[in-house]
Amino acid sequence: MPVSGCPSGGARSETNEMKFKQHVPVQVSESFWLCALLTMTGGFLDVYTYVTRGQVFANAQTGNIVLLGLNIAEGHIRESLYYLLPIAAFALGILFVEWIRARFREYSQLHWRQIVVFLEALLLLLPAFMVSGAWDTQVNILISFVCAVQVESFRKVRGQNIATTMCTGNLRTATEQIFYYLHSHDAETGRRILGYYEMVLFFILGAAAGAVLTAQFAEKSILFCSAMLGVAFFSMFMKEV
């Protein structure tokens, strides 16, 4: 019999296993705070394009597709291109990421995701100097491309499949997991639910920040997004957290 007050071999093993799980290192590209920063950027960009660039969504391509269909139905063919072009740019962004991943997967100097974030930060400098109204179509194409690049590149948070640029899927999955948690009361499921809702919250915070800063700085407010991506880029020089 184990001595009173001392954990048994099974208890020690369970304790060690818990400690191991708690200290498993996570790649910086999947770390909570990096993904929270990227998610806030996503919310910010949606507000930015909607408020300053003619009510087009940067991330929510479903909304753009609906508006595309609506304009086609009403016979506004020219106006429908206003929504078709960002949709096409989003699709090109996905293809671009897959090319970057294949081309630089084995590159030792920088991780391919760092290259992606660096390009995002550079591209988002441009709209700050493109006047609202005259350049809206070009800016919407550019930002939709950037958002696609981000959503395709960062799809995990602490090993969990969570979108970092849009929140519809996160909201769906989190609510679905609540059903399973109510039946199983599994602690890991509870942590997954929390992770999804945390990213939804950060998306909302990014959108709120976008609304405030856009009202103050108009098209130049996007420089804040570029700065956040700059922080993300340099933080990724850490191997793990």
Image (cartoon, grey):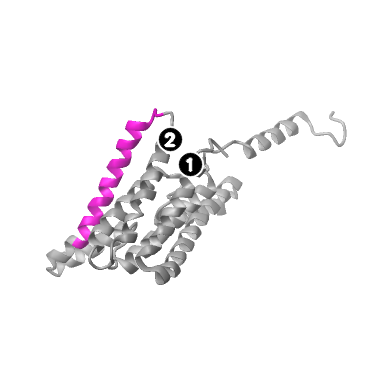
Contact (Cβ within 8 Å) of mark 1 with mark 2: yes
Residue 157 visible in the displayed image = no
The magenta stretch is 82-107
Q: Residues within 10 Å of mark 1 (few under 14, many from 20)?
A: many
- In the image, 172 versus 108, the foreground residue is 108
Give the percent coordinates (x, y) of residue 163: 42, 50
**Under tag 2, what secondary structure?**
loop
Query: Which amino acid, by three-letter code, is at mark 1?
Result: Ser
User: Is residue 2 rendered to the left or right of residue 55?
Assistant: right
Mark 2 = which residue? 111
Circle on res. 29 = 1
Count of picture labels: 2
Q: Is the magenta stretch mostly helix, strand or loop?
A: helix
Residue occupying image coordinates x 58% and y 40%: 241
Question: Which residue sits furthest front?
Answer: 129
User: Is residue 26 rendered to the left or right of residue 63?
Assistant: right
Q: Residues within 10 Å of mark 2 (few under 14, many from 20)?
A: some
Circle on res. 218 = none
Give the percent coordinates (x, y) of residue 211: 42, 68
Give the percent coordinates (x, y) of residue 194: 55, 53
User: Is residue 6 rendered to the left or right of residue 95?
Assistant: right
- In the image, 30 versus 112, the foreground residue is 112
Query: Which amino acid, by three-letter code, is at mark 2?
Result: His
Q: In which quarter of the image is residue 112?
A: top left
